[in-house]
Every structure is written in C-alpha cells, then in structure tokens.
Amino acid sequence: MHGVTRLEVLVVTCQRRQRVKTWRKLERALLLRFRENYGELPRFNQQGKQMRWTDELSYFRRERLDQIMADLED
C-alpha cells in the first residue's frame, strides 16, 4: 500500500487438541467473525471470501472471538 511506513504483527494462539488443527480453526473463526462485525474481510486478505461457518463455534465462543479482536485493536 502506498505510504505504509509501519506494519504491526500480533500473534494469537490457542490450546492444542488431538487430531485438530486448532490454529487453523481459530484463524477461520476470527476471519468469519471479522466479516460479520465489519461487513467485509480485512484488506488484502486472500482467503475467506466464500468461507462459511462449519464447526469453528464448537471450539471457540463468539464472545471470546470478539474479545480477542477488541484486544487487538488497542
């Protein structure tokens, strides 16, 4: 993006579960929740345009996802 002089990266993690890629579930859940809250995905995000909820809410609560996003805004 023209004029960008700084890029900030934050890492969000979750607990492991057997035979489940929880980090991938968390990423999907956060992207879906972001789209619900703001109407579109983050700029330049290539994945998630056609994504729908599957079983992500069985691993993470909507309230917790909202809290994570609010903490990242600060």
Image (spheres, rainbow, N blue to C red):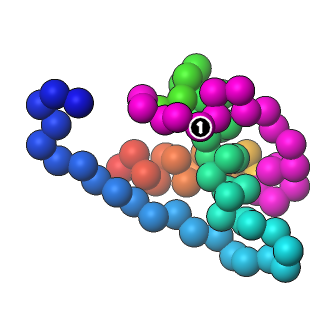
Report the side of 30 relative to 59 (left or right). Answer: left
Q: Is residue 45 above or below residue 61?
A: above
Q: Is residue 62 above or below residue 50?
A: below
Q: Residue at x 46, y 53 (%)?
A: 71
- Element under disc 1: loop
Q: In the rendered image, which quarter is residue 59 located in?
A: bottom right
Report the side of 2 relative to 42 (left or right). Answer: left
List x then y, in percent, for residue 63. 69, 48
**Would you name the residue on which mark 1 appears?**
47
- The residue closer to the viewer here, 13 or 20, is 20
List x then y, in percent, for residue 62. 73, 45
List x then y, in percent, for residue 61. 76, 52
Crowding near the residue tagged with mark 1, few <14, some 14–19, many ≥20 C-alpha atoms within 10 Å:
few
Task: Say which amino acid is labelled 1.
Answer: Gln
**Residue 66 drawn in magenta:** no
Q: In the rendered image, which quarter is residue 47 located in?
A: top right
Q: Main secondary structure of the magenta part?
A: loop
Please provide the residue range marked out in magenta: 43-60
Q: Residue at x 55, y 23 (%)?
A: 40
List x then y, in percent, for residue 41. 54, 29
- The residue closer to the viewer here, 73 or 15, is 15
